[in-house]
Structure formats: C-alpha cells, structure tokens
Amino acid sequence: MVNCAGILQSGQRVLDQNLDEDEALWRVNYRGTLLGCQVFGRVMATAGGGAILNVGSLASFAPLSLPAYTPGKHAVLASTEILAAELGPRGVRVNAVAPGYTLSDGLKARIAKGERNSDAIKATTALRRFVEPRDVAEAAMFLCSDRAASITGVTLPVDAGWLVQAPYAQYLQGNPIRPAPQPDWASETCPISDASTSTRASVMA
C-alpha cells in the first residue's frame, strides 16, 4: 500500500502561518497517511505480511520554511519508524521515500512561467539534475518488493544529492567546485599490447 496523497505549501514564516491552512495540511499530509496506515496495517497484520510505503519529503530531514508542511513530513518520518517497530513482528514492513525537486508537471509549469529557475534548482543538488518521477517510482517499487525483505523503518531520500550538497556547499563560498585534474597517465596513448597500459586499463575498469 502506497500513501501518496498530499498537498503543498508556499514558503512563509511560522509567525505568519494561517491556522486554517495549517489544519488542511495536517489533515491531508499527516492524518491521511496515518489513516491509510491504520486501515491497511490492520489488514496486513491479520494476513501475516505486507508492505506499506509512505511519502515523506526533504522536509522530513531539513527545516524548510514551510511551517505546516515541514512538521507534517517530520511526523510522517516518525510514524513510519514507529509503525515499522509495531508491525514488524506481524511480518509487515513500513518504509518511506523522501523525494527532492521532482520534475513533475506542476514544477514544469512553474518553470515555464518563470516562477522557478531550473538551473538554480539543479545547482543545489550534488548530481546537478532534477529527480524524475520515475526515479521516485523505482525507489518505491524496490522498497515494496521482496528485494527489500530485510528493510523496514527507513525513509529513503531520492533527491539527486540535495541533502549532502546543501551543507557541503556552505564551506565553498567563492571557491566553486572545479573538475578534478586527470592523472598524467590518463592522456597516454600507448599501444594496447603494452603491459603497463593493460594494467592501467584494468585499474580504470
């Protein structure tokens, strides 16, 4: 069972948070996820097995300026861990994925309108790319499959390296990353029959 319903929020300050919006986000993003886990968790526990997948966010790990969305996604991470411990003895696994900036139709539309800068977004990730919807689906399918039979209680970031890039880049202000220099032998053009070249080729492989 995949809990994938959710609503988004625009950036704002905690002191400006509208309580009606806060209630709506908690009702859908957290309590909707909780309800799905309760209903299907009972069924799976009775059956003696199953897999539940929740959808978290980068906001599950980082204090993004989304004062209702972020706490809700933190709560999804916590409930995923609690349920994994609670349902594990019944053979039920509970995990979550935490997507990064995913190139969804909604994000594409915002980029087309000039509301989002695609280059700036990609620059915040270690891989310098967007997450594709398929990337999130593949991670979800893995966590729900028998290949992940020993994995439970995990919230897996699918973020193209956003979580590692953000803190790493703090110490590189004014000193951007440059391509690593190649070793001298990388540009050599020795015959492939040469023993030293064969050894180097093996090492590179």
Image: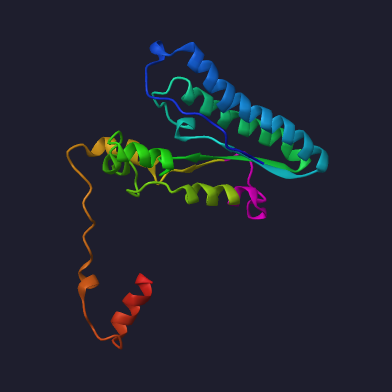
Identify the residue at horizontal 48%, vertical 35% (top origin): 57
Q: Percent from the top left, x then y, of residue 39? A: 73, 32
Q: Percent from the top left, x then y, of residue 169? A: 28, 39
* Left or right of 158 in this view: 29: right
Q: Is residue 146 magenta?
A: yes
Q: Is residue 14 above or below residue 35?
A: above
Given the current orientation, which residue lies at the most extreme left position?
174
Given the current orientation, which residue lies at the most extreme bottom position?
193
Q: Percent from the top left, x then y, of residue 54? A: 59, 37
Q: To which quarter of the image does residue 52 belong?
A: top right
* Left or right of 4 in this view: 122: left
Identify the residue at horizontal 67%, vertical 54% (top origin): 146
Q: Is residue 68 above or below residue 59?
A: above
Q: Percent from the top left, x then y, of residue 36? A: 67, 32
Identify the residue at horizontal 34%, vertical 46% (top origin): 126
Identify the residue at horizontal 63%, vertical 46% (top origin): 151
Given the current orientation, which residue lies at the most extreme right position?
46
State the residue in front, 169 or 123. Answer: 123
Q: Is residue 129 above or below residue 55?
A: below
* Left or right of 52 in this view: 6: left
Q: Is residue 32 magenta?
A: no
For the C terminus, which image quadrant? bottom left
For the N terminus, which image quadrant? top right
Q: To which quarter of the image does residue 123 belong?
A: top left
* Left or right of 76 in this view: 197: left
State the residue in front, 76 or 116. Answer: 116
| Magenta span of residues | 142-154
Q: To which quarter of the image does residue 125 belong?
A: top left
Q: How is the image coloured?
A: rainbow
